[in-house]
Image (cartoon, rainbow, N blue to C red):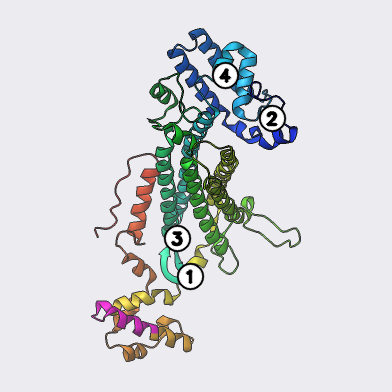
């Protein structure tokens, strides 16, 4: 690449500084697939012969085999994965290898490789999200009737089923799947043929190349095609949101595993110990996942910052997108794998959850709604129940043990049937609007997700007619 224009070799320090093969070598299967498709188009256009095309095809497949078997020697002086493979091909098959780069630039070549890589990783990460959702669903089925407190501000709020909580996590991860699939639509555009920025006078059948490589569309502007990294930014954003969801799940599990809560216990296989304190059993996997989310955010901001001041078309700055992209993929892949394996081994302490859910204050809203059903305006009912809660706290009594006359003092609407309000399971059964945590709704949602995750046609949830 330097033999024509340059009179002296690149300085060793500059060569080492600019080389990317130490990380972009991972794009090799996509680079080879793109080169095979490009060679086919060159042969169709009569630029190379059928024999040359076959030599290129066979040579590239042999190189891929050597890479996969650990026999290929990467050369940093050749800068990147593209030049390493091209140089190895030319060494193997001679002059035909030197014809492969006709009507192609590294600019559209790397854009192609990245798009192929992102498309493949979207499918892999979606599959891992499905595995995590399945682990959550299995846990929900196993503990379908366990009652726990729901929290706002980390304060006990209202009773829910633990399975309802787990189904909420499935919903969040489903949005991640949807986002990733949507991102794939914008990634699914063939840039090859854009050249350095203005195409080539040697016209190839780009539609045919797109079909061979599995792209649904072809880029319509060569300048935009080589300078576009929106798809990479969007992909990193999707991965950052996956990390955020994993981090929030981690935080819940970490909190609930403390002695103060005692709702769950991590298995020994997914816990860490202390180098000093022999009694410790730490939620290391969840904590690491919570921490790694910061890396995902950082990688997203890194590429956005790199791109923000670049002029249109390709700039070498864009080389900096790959490490961030590869690191985020590795981080999310590993986190999803760990969680899918860790969740089935979590021990659920039903007694601790249900004891906490037995706090009668969790039914204060039900008490206000009791008054509303008797005809009181909600704000008036809210004030009355607030005074009852305050009285109970001052008297050091559970809310359901406040004497009945105290209820009557605050509102004549209170009757003997007010005692029924403090039945937790009765309260949950009455929460039957779409999306609410009645047992009927929860069971219908479990059935719905079982159909969805098992690949069958999911039926519409019919737990409620509201």
Q: Nearer the viewer, mark 4 or mark 2?
A: 2
- Disc 1 target residue: 153
The C terminus, quarter of image = bottom left
Q: Which residue is mark 4?
A: 60
**Who comes first in sequence, dot 1 or dot 3?**
1
Is the residue marked by circle 1 packed among few (<14), some (14-19), or many (20+) residues within 10 Å?
few
Measured Cα–Cα span from mark 1 to mark 3: 18 Å
Q: Spatial distance from mark 2 to mark 1, Cα to Cα? A: 53 Å
Quadrant of the rendered image containing residue 360: bottom left
Q: Position of residue 403 (x, y in %)?
A: 39, 88
Q: Which residue is mark 2?
A: 76
Q: Nearer the viewer, residue 386 or 367?
A: 386
Residue extent of the magenta highlight:
372-386
- Measured along the vertical axis of the image, is residue 422 above or below residue 194? below
Q: Nearer the viewer, mark 4 or mark 3?
A: 4
Which structural element holds mark 3? Answer: helix
**Helix, strand or loop status at disc 4:** helix
Relative horizontal placement of residue 362, taking residue 117 as reference (left or right):
left
How crowded pointer 3 is (Cα within 10 Å; few <14, some 14-19, many 20+) is rated as many
Disc 1 is placed on an element classified as: loop
First-in-chain label (4 vs 2): 4
């Amino acid at each position: 690449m330097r033999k024509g224009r340059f009179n002296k070799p690149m300085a060793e320090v500059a060569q080492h500084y600019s080389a990317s093969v130490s990380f972009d070598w991972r794009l090799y299967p996509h680079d080879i697939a793109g080169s095979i498709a490009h060679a086919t188009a060159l042969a169709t256009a009569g630029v190379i012969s059928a024999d040359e095309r076959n030599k290129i095809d066979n040579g590239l497949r042999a190189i891929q085999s050597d890479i996969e078997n650990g026999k290929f020697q990467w050369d940093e002086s050749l800068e990147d994965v593209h030049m390493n493979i091209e140089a190895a091909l030319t060494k193997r098959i001679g002059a035909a290898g030197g014809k492969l780069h006709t009507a192609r630039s590294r600019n559209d070549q790397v854009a192609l490789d990245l798009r192929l890589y992102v498309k493949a990783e979207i499918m892999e990460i979606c599959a891992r999200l499905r595995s995590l959702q399945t682990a959550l669903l299995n846990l929900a089925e196993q503990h379908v009737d366990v009652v726990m407190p729901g929290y706002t501000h980390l304060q006990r709020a209202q009773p829910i089923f633990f399975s309802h909580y787990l189904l909420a996590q499935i919903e969040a991860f489903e949005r991640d799947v949807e986002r990733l699939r949507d991102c794939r639509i914008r990634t699914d555009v063939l840039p090859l043929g854009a050249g350095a920025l203005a195409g080539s006078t040697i016209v190839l059948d780009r539609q045919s190349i797109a079909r061979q490589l599995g792209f649904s569309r072809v880029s319509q502007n060569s300048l935009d095609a080589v300078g576009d990294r929106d798809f990479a930014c969007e992909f990193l954003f999707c991965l950052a949101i996956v990390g955020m969801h994993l981090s929030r799940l981690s935080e819940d599990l970490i909190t609930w595993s403390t002695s103060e809560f005692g709702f769950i216990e991590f298995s020994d296989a997914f816990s860490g110990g202390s180098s000093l304190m022999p009694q410790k059993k730490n939620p290391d996997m969840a904590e690491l996942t919570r921490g790694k989310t910061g890396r995902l955010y950082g990688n997203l901001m890194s590429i956005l910052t790199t791109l923000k001041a670049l002029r249109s078309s390709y700039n070498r700055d864009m080389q900096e997108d790959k490490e961030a992209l590869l690191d985020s993929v590795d981080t999310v892949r590993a986190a999803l794998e760990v969680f899918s394996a860790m969740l089935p081994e979590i021990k659920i302490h039903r007694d601790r959850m249900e004891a906490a859910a037995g706090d009668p204050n969790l039914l204060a809203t039900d008490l206000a709604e009791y008054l509303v059903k008797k005809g009181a305006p909600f704000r008036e009912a809210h004030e009355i129940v607030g005074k009852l809660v305050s009285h109970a706290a001052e008297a050091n009594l559970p809310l359901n043990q406040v004497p009945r006359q105290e209820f009557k003092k605050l509102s004549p609407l209170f009757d003997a049937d007010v005692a029924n309000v403090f039945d937790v399971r009765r309260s949950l059964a009455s929460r039957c609007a779409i999306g609410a945590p009645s047992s009927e709704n929860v069971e219908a949602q479990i059935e719905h997700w079982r159909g969805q995750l098992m690949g069958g046609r999911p039926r519409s949830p019919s737990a409620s007619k509201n």
